[in-house]
Amino acid sequence: IIARQSDSAAIINIAGRQRMLSQRTAMLATELVALGDERTRNDLLAAVDLMDRSHTALTRGDPAMGIVSNLSPAMKVFYFEGPADLDRRMGIFLDKARRIADPASPPAEREAALKHVQEEARRPLLQSLDDAVRRFEEEANARVDSLRTVQRGVLIILLSTLLLEALFIFRPLVNKVRDFARRLYAAATT
C-alpha cells in the first residue's frame, strides 16, 4: 500500500506540475515574443524541457522521477486516443514553444506559435491536464481501496490460521500435558 501510494503521489504531483508548467510556458513565451525580453529564453527552454520530461515520465514511466508504473488502459486511451488526445496535443504545444524559443524562427512563425501556445494554455490543454490529474487521483484511490480489501482478506486468513492452530495443535498439546501432569501427580502421591 505504501509503495502504491508513493507511486500514485509522484504521478499526481507530476501531472499537477504539468498544469503549472503550461501556464509558465505561455507566460514566458509571451514575454519573449511580445515584450522582446531575451532573458526569458533560457527559462522558457527549461520549462519546456521539464514539461517534456514530465510528460514522458507520465506516459512511459520514469523511476528517476518516482514513477514506476505504466499507464492504465483507460489512461492510455485518454492520453493517446480519446477526445483529449493529450499526447498529440502536448507534442504540438511543446513543438510550438520550442519554435518560439528558437531565435532562428521567422517572426511570423513565432507569432503564430505564440498564439497557439496562449490559446492552448488558456483553455483546452489546461482542461485536459486538469482532467488527467482528476483521473490519476481516481485511479490511485481505487487502487488503494482494492489493496486495503486484499489486506483485510490476508488479515482474516492469518487470524483464521492462528485460530485453527490453537484448536487443532495447541489445544490437544495442552490436553496431553494436563493428562501427563495428572498421571505424574497420581503416581507421585500413590
Image: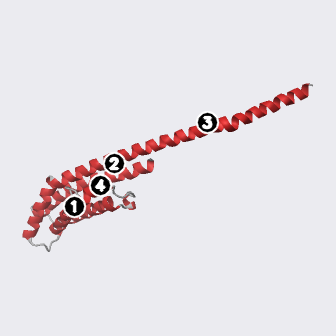
Q: Of callouts 2 and 3, which one flags the residue occurring earlier in the amino acid sequence?
A: 2
Between 164 and 62, the one lying in front of the other is: 164
Position of residue 179 relative to residue 8, above or below, is above
Q: Of callouts 4 and 3, which one flags the residue occurring earlier in the amino acid sequence?
A: 4
Label 3: few (<14), some (14–19) or many (≥20) C-alpha neighbours in 10 Å: few
For residue 172, say whether it is visible.
Answer: yes
The tag on residue 163 is 3
Q: CA distance from mark 2 to mark 4?
A: 9 Å
Q: Of callouts 2 and 1, which one flags the residue occurring earlier in the amino acid sequence?
A: 1
Amino acid type of the residue tagged 3 in the rendering: Leu
Question: Residues at badges 2 and 1 in contact (C-beta under 8 Å)?
Answer: no
Q: Secondary structure at mark 2?
A: helix
Of circles 2 and 3, which is in front? 3
Q: CA distance from mark 1 to mark 4?
A: 15 Å
Label 1: few (<14), some (14–19) or many (≥20) C-alpha neighbours in 10 Å: many
Q: Is residue 58 left or right of residue 88?
A: right
Residue highlighted by disc 4 = 75
Spot occupied by residue 157 in the image (x, y as percentages of width and height) = 54, 41
Q: Residue furthest top?
A: 189
Q: Quadrant of residue 35?
A: bottom left
Question: Residues at badges 3 and 1 in contact (C-beta under 8 Å)?
Answer: no
Q: Is residue 186 left or right of residue 95?
A: right
Position of residue 9 relative to residue 164, above or below, is below
Residue highlighted by disc 1 = 90
Question: Residues at badges 2 and 4 in contact (C-beta under 8 Å)?
Answer: yes
Amino acid type of the residue tagged 4 in the rendering: Met
Question: Residues at badges 4 and 3 in contact (C-beta under 8 Å)?
Answer: no
Q: CA distance from mark 2 to mark 1?
A: 22 Å
Q: Secondary structure at mark 3?
A: helix
Q: Of callouts 3 and 1, which one flags the residue occurring earlier in the amino acid sequence?
A: 1
**Which residue appears at 15% of the width and 52% of the height?**
123
